[in-house]
Amino acid sequence: MTGESGEPCVPEPGSFALDTRDGRVGRVMGRVGSYVQLRPPGGGAEWDCPPDLVRPAPPGLELRARVTEINREGRLPR
């Protein structure tokens, strides 16, 4: 998926995206060099993905990721 300039369309930071290499969903944290950084729902180590292999997460996968984050927040000590 590319924009008008021919550059890959990368989902906005804070949104959920799909790494098409392996099907993982992560929250877009930003860009580092030529890579998009994604973080697993609920936290964990970020991973790098080439921008041409990142797609917006489909609604069902985004919902699952949001539920994972909410459940994780509920287990953290306050």
Image (spheres, rainbow, N blue to C red):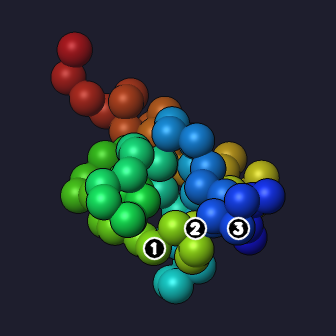
| Label 1 packing within 10 angstroms: few (<14), some (14-19), many (20+) | some
Structural distance between the alpha carbons of marks 1 and 3 = 15 Å
Residue 45 placement (x, y as % from top left): 23, 58
Residue, far top:
78
Residue 36 position, x and y percent, is 42, 59
- Residue flagged by tag 3: what amino acid is it? Gly
Task: Tell us which disc is closer to us: 1 or 3.
Answer: 3
Query: How much space separates mark 1 and mark 2, taking CA atoms?
Result: 7 Å
Residue 57 in sight from this viewpoint: no
Q: Confirm or deny contact between disc 1 and disc 2 (CB under 8 A).
A: yes
The image position of residue 71, as x and y in percent, is 45, 38
Which residue is rendered at x = 42% and y = 71% of the image?
Answer: 49
Which residue is at 79% across, 58% downward?
A: 4
Determine which of the numbered discs, if any, sits on residue 54 in the image: 2
At x 77%, y 52%, the residue is 59
Q: Which residue is mark 1?
A: 50
Quadrant where the C terminus lies?
top left
The residue labelled by disc 3 is 6
Q: Residue furthest bottom?
A: 21
* Depicted 72 relative to depicted 25: above or below: above
The label nearer to you, 2 versus 3, is: 3
User: What separation in Å lies between label 2 and label 3 (alpha carbons)?
Assistant: 15 Å
Callout 3 crowding tier (Cα within 10 Å): few <14, some 14–19, many ≥20 = few
Apparent side of residue 22 relative to residue 7 in the rendered image (left or right): left
Tell me which label, 1 or 3, sits earlier in the chain: 3
Q: Is residue 14 depicted above or below 52 in this figure?
A: above
Q: Earlier in the sequence, mark 2 or mark 3?
A: 3
Does 70 sit left or right of 15 as displayed? left
Q: Amino acid at mark 1?
A: Pro
In the displayed image of the protein, which residue is found farthest to the front? Answer: 5
